[in-house]
Image (spheres, rainbow, N blue to C red):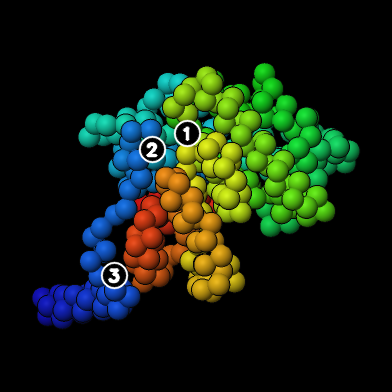
Amino acid sequence: MATLMTRRPLILSGLLGVAGIVGGLGAAPLLGRRTSANLAGVTVERWGCQYQRIEPGSIAASDLDLIVVDPIVEGERLDAQGISALRAKPGGGKRLVLAYLSVGEAESYRAYWKAGWREAPPSWLGPENPRWPGSFAVRYWQTEWRNVLLGEEGTFEAILSAGFDGVFLDRVDAYGDWRGRGVQAQRDMIDLVTTLSSTAKARHPGFLMIAQNAEPLLTNEAYCGAIDAVSKESLLYNLHGEGVANSDADIQWSLTYLEKAQARGLPILAIEYIDDTVSRLKARARLTRLGFVPFFGNRLLDRLPA
């Protein structure tokens, strides 16, 4: 009994200390607040991504308003029935279910990958990403890569046919892999994203297009018109090392673009890869002040968002 009595004040003191740290940022009232985004008529306060070790039952039982998943679960492509099961929230209401799609890299574990491509790559396939083995840069402006996405048996076509509520476009910033093409690299990516969007919305008018990173493209009117929201990774932490706060200059560079997109009416979703409790509280407070909807994940995105 004596141990319990001495622990309780210590725990309370610790919680008050954390609140004081966040309160020192002028954000104490935000500890209980959440920002939200309206997407396809759904109020999104809690969201996240999970690309590995997906357990559909756990997702269905969660209170997430939006989940981004890999369209292949345990070797099987999610179908309309599986997506419908993920969409229903326990207390009623709809959860948005989006499919992950990399538009700027090819992945060697996808159905489109051919066994001999490492030794004899097709003309559109570039070098392997040293940070993510199995992911390869693509010349995304070439017809052959577009056919991989948009052909009759293409990856994007499969997502549209399955009945997802939308798609989460990753590696939109892959124009940075082709600096020799200059501004044309950005133009080509804008053309690809707008083509995907017009294709999807012609068939499913409410289909959501969320694009990740690639902030400079947010100055382009056609690009902003083609997407429904922006996801920004690591706005506040990790550009200079795991758990290291980004510089004010780093943050302001992104905010210059993100706030313009926000002024256009595009919701901003934010992903931070930090585990430290105090850093998370500080990050949530700042992101909430900015009007962004945060998600805190691990790098592998292999567990259900907390």
Amino acid at the residue labelled 2: Leu
Q: Secondary structure at mark 2?
A: strand
Asked whether the residues under the numbered discs 2 and 1 touch, taking CB atoms below 8 Å apart as contact, a structural biologist would say yes
x and y percentages locating residue 137 in the rendered image: 75, 46
The residues tagged by marks 1 and 3 sit, at their Cα atoms, a distance apart of 32 Å
Side of 32 where 56 appears, left or right:
right
Q: CA distance from mark 3 to mark 2?
A: 26 Å
Compare residues 144 and 119 and report the one nearer the observer: 144
**Whether residue 135 can be seen here:** no
Where's residue 208, x and y in %? 47, 33
Label 2, label 1: how far apart the Cα atoms are = 8 Å
Q: Which residue is mark 3?
A: 27
* Residue in the image at 55% along x and 26% along y: 200
**Viewer-proximal residue, 44 or 1?**
44
Q: Is residue 114 above or below residue 284?
A: above
Q: Where on the picture, by quarter, is residue 91?
A: top left
Mark 2 Cα shell of 10 Å, populated few (<14), some (14-19), many (≥20): some
- Kindly identify which residue carries mark 1: 208
Tell me the crowding category of disc 1: few under 14, some 14 to 19, or many 20 or more residues within 10 angstroms, Cα based.
many
Which residue shows up at 26% across the image and 64% down it?
Answer: 31
Residue 213, x across and y down, in percent:
57, 52
Rendered view: 256 above or below 119: below
Q: Disc 3 or 2, which lies upstream in sequence?
A: 3
Neighbour tally class for label 3: few under 14, some 14-19, many 20 plus, Cα within 10 Å: some
Please report the residue visible at 26 percent of the width from the left and 78 percent of the height from the top.
Answer: 20
Q: Nearer the viewer, residue 143 or 49?
A: 143
N-terminal of the pair, mark 1 or mark 3, is: 3
